[in-house]
Image (cartoon, rainbow, N blue to C red):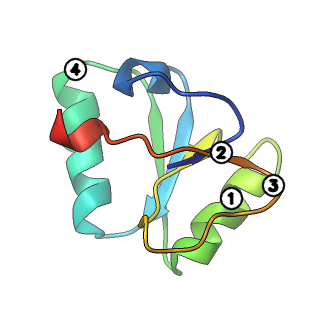
Amino acid sequence: MVAREHLDSILSLEGLKIAGVKEDLYFESLKKLASDFKIDCEFLEVMGDYREVVEQVRSRGRCGCGFKNLCIPPCEGIGEKQHNFLSR
């Protein structure tokens, strides 16, 4: 997860716009988990790759956070923490 602000838990997604790669298995799981917890957030599906997700977060006003593969190197200029919401 890349974010402009600290995220404590999945509940921190409330009110945020979250970018992710369209049809990514883990992004789809995050959407289901947010729905199960009744979290009011918006999902933006990007057609590109994880770099496009990061750009959506870097571009102020587009997305508050983005879901990307942990194998992708950390991103300069925005906070990036390992938020493993899916395995809890």
Give the labeled residue for mark 4: 37
* Badge 4 or badge 2: first in the primary sequence: 4
C-beta proximity under 8 Å, tags 3 and 1: yes
Q: Nearer the viewer, residue 40 or 33?
A: 33
What percent of the width, then of the height, locates residue 49? 51, 79
* Badge 4 or badge 3: first in the primary sequence: 4
- The kind of residue tagged 3 is Ser
- The kind of residue tagged 4 is Phe
* Badge 1 or badge 2: first in the primary sequence: 1
Look at the picture and state if 71 lies above or below 16. Answer: below
Q: Quadrant of residue 21?
A: bottom left
Residue located 55% across and 44% down the image = 81
Task: Describe residue 80's horizontal placement relative to residue 43 as left or right.
Answer: right
Q: Nearer the viewer, residue 84 or 36?
A: 84
Residue 63, which numbered label?
2
Residue 59, which numbered label?
3
C-beta proximity under 8 Å, tags 4 and 3: no
Q: Nearer the viewer, residue 35 or 51?
A: 51
- Mark 1 crowdedness (10 Å alpha carbons): few <14, some 14-19, many ≥20: many
Residue located 83% across and 55% down the image = 77
C-beta proximity under 8 Å, tags 3 and 2: yes
Look at the picture and state if 69 lies above or below 79. Answer: below
Residue 36, which numbered label?
none
- Mark 3 crowdedness (10 Å alpha carbons): few <14, some 14-19, many ≥20: few
Residue 56, which numbered label?
1
Q: How far is disc 3 from disc 2 in space, using C-alphas?
A: 8 Å
